[in-house]
Amino acid sequence: MGKQNTITKDYMSVPEHFADCFNYYLFDGEQIIKPANLKPLDPTELAIIPEDSTDETVEKIRDLLKQCIVMQDNKATYLLLGIENQSDIHYALPVKNMNYDALNYGRQVSDIAKEHRKNRDIKDGGEFLSGFTKEDKLKPIITLTIYFGAEVWDAPRSLKEMFEEIDESIMKFVEDYKVHLIVPNEIQDFDKFATDFGKVMKYIAVSKDKVALEELQNDEEFRSVDADSVRLLNACTNSNISIKEGDDKMDMCTGLKELLEDKREEGREEGIGLGENKKLKQQVEKKVKKGYSVEQIADMLEEDVDVISRIIKEIEHQ
């Protein structure tokens, strides 16, 4: 999974792809978040936990984190946007993402407190103890998980789904944390993506459906797909669509036709191989019944003695 993780992280770090995902998820495809307004941030989340004698530092590294200014109705909103790439289904994702967000909020409070101490602008009272004044504000964080698999997502999408069944009279006092998630086979309209990321999701969604793949090779949208997107879908689906060196764009319809033809040829060769093995096994079985030795059978059928010995053992254990 190391290579796939590297490819997905590099791909999603591109501002256009990063913005595309959030515009799809938050604004139904409307181009509100501009790639130029994204500022990369350190994805390391730190928290210092006080202990009796020493302070323990907790460190978590999320995949991607960017700061963004969103303009709506002439009003600017500052957001922190995080992306988590998942190649496999994660059954504790609500806790994982909640940890990232909580650590970031903790760091925001800590940074604000440090600034106040530096400026010595808080004298006493509760504000002095917390280092956080009534006027101080945090930047909201939205963490979006991208699932790069073809399977149905059957893991919890909220913290409350991870609990055993609890009486509602108690559960109403338990805070929840909901996961924001993009799953390829749940996408209804791939045209709401502005980049070729939508084609990556569409390909992954049908990658295990032979009939759908056959149809995809005639999809005109796949006549021109950027090479990085093809590398990504190859890594996520174990496909082997060829990419010509130096080409920025490629005709995936042609590449997909070649891939499907290669798979059909492999199937034919495998079928021939299975047929030949079955025939050889039948011949060996007949000669064993006639009392021939392993060496004699190998000589008659022009096969290696070890191969004949293995086939005889298989026959004996039937």
Image (tube, rainbow, N blue to C red):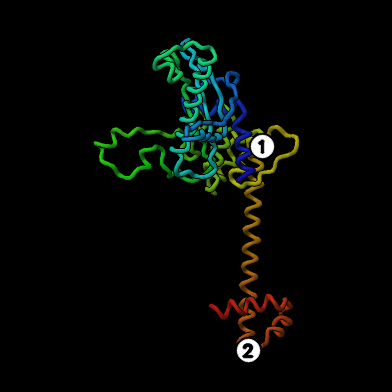
In the image, farthest residue toward the bottom: 291
Q: Is residue 181 visible?
A: no
In the image, farthest residue toward the right: 246
Q: In this view, does 106 lie above or below 60?
A: above
Please, what is the three-letter code of the amino acid marked with disc 1?
Asp
Pick the front one: 191 or 73: 73
Residue drawn at x 54%, y 37% as measured from the top left: 85
Give the mark count: 2
**Residue 67 placed where, x, y %?**
55, 22
Tell me: 304 left or right of 180: right
Tell me: 205 left or right of 284: left
Q: In the image, which disc is placed on residue 165?
A: none
Pick the front one: 275 or 57: 57
Disc 1 vs disc 2: Cβ atoms closer than 8 Å?
no
Pick the front one: 41 or 223: 41
Check disc 1 and report its element: helix, strand or loop.
loop
Dot 1: within a 10 Å radius of its alpha carbon, few (fewer than 14), some, or many (20 or more) residues? some
Please, what is the three-letter code of the amino acid marked with disc 2?
Lys
Dot 2: within a 10 Å radius of its alpha carbon, few (fewer than 14), some, or many (20 or more) residues? few
Q: Is residue 276 above or below residue 187?
A: below
In the image, farthest residue toward the front: 53
Find disc 1 in the rendering and name its residue: 251
Q: Measure the C-alpha gap from mark 1 to mark 2.
A: 60 Å
Q: In this view, does 122 lie above or below 81?
A: above
Find disc 2 in the rendering and name its residue: 290
